[in-house]
Image (cartoon, rainbow, N blue to C red):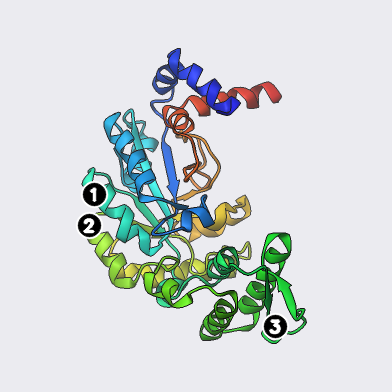
Amino acid sequence: MSLKEIFYTAAKTSGCFAMASRLTHSKLGILCYHGFSFKDEHLFRPQLFQTPDSFENRMRWLKRTGYRALPLDEAAQRLRKGKLGRKEIVITIDDGFYSVAALAAPILSGLGFTATVYVTTYYVLNNNPIFRIALQYLFWKTPRATVACGDLLPGMDAQSATKGVGGERTAWKFIEFGEASLDEPGRMALARGLARRLEVDFEELVASRRLTLLTEAEITELSRRGFDIQLHTHRHRLPENDRDAKRELDDNRAVLAPLTGRPLNHLCYPSGVWSQALWPVLEAEGVDTCTTCEPGLNSPETPPLAWSRFLDFQYVPQIVFEAEMSGFAHVVRRAVQRWKG
């Protein structure tokens, strides 16, 4: 048990969690998730993928302890008007992996919860494994220590490392080449060729959809079932150039709007990267709220284009999760910030 866990356990036992919950009852907590694991994705990227059992345990704890999940738009209105109820939260899921529909949605619906699903749409239209993540997975999964790839990429050594720092460099050379120089069919052909040499079953990865996003029909079905579909850019990037940022939002909306028939006025910053320089174009584009990946609770005074969220993932201890949900972790962070400055 870490020192943080020991501290939080003592705080909970002494009633500090309950006190913090009362002190922060008017603030909005937002949970952040990404994908869910069919096989070994949670071992590959534990901050990106969570097992269904782990996710269900979290959701059952929320239900058992009286939390209510609100649609993001309703939560935003309640927060602005000072009418947010105690233990009213928002659950958000980023990117729009196929596993949201296949694994997470049945758990949420079974408990009477809803969620906001921020969907990036390039890989909705091109329903392949996400190239960058797929290549990283291939290098993580391979049993080989080296790979012969000099003929696949100009300038590569005849034999290149697949593990450790050397393996990361090899993978990123292929990722950067594919993203800069190839079209989508070319990237998939490169991934297949690498997978054969790395002795990883790429066809299983494609067929299982473990690293693939939702289809248009699946997004429509999630929306019909009451899940809130919102913006996450088209290509999972938000340049600070106004024209390019606007293009990302317009392209994202062009895909999602016909599928949901609902307002698309909430955005999640891709990879949590954000800047106030983006706010004028976001406001001009009718974006009401943006969520970051910075932990904390949100008050009516929190800039709506810089809302905080708690990123929950596979190896977050339960006591840490409870400290965040109760508001105790937020109170401690604020106290430390005041002490430092």
The residue wearing badge 1 is 109
Real-space Cα distance between discs 2 and 1?
9 Å
- Of mark 2 and mark 1, the one earlier in the sequence is 1
Sequence-wise, the earlier of marks 3 and 2 is: 3
Label 3: which residue? 153
Sequence-first disc among 1 and 3 = 1
Contact between marks 3 and 2 (CB within 8 A): the answer is no
Is the residue 228 above or below the residue 71 in the image? below
Q: Residue at x 63, y 65 (%)?
A: 241
Q: Position of residue 103 (x, y in %)?
A: 32, 56
Q: Amino acid at mark 3?
A: Leu
* Gap in angstroms between the C-alphas marked 3 and 2: 45 Å
Q: What number is the disc on residue 225?
A: 2
Check whether the beta carbons of the residues at disc 2 and disc 1 lie within 8 A of each other. Answer: yes
From the top left corner, tell me how far across and down residue 99 is, in percent. 36, 60
Determine whether 147 is above or below 100 in the image: below
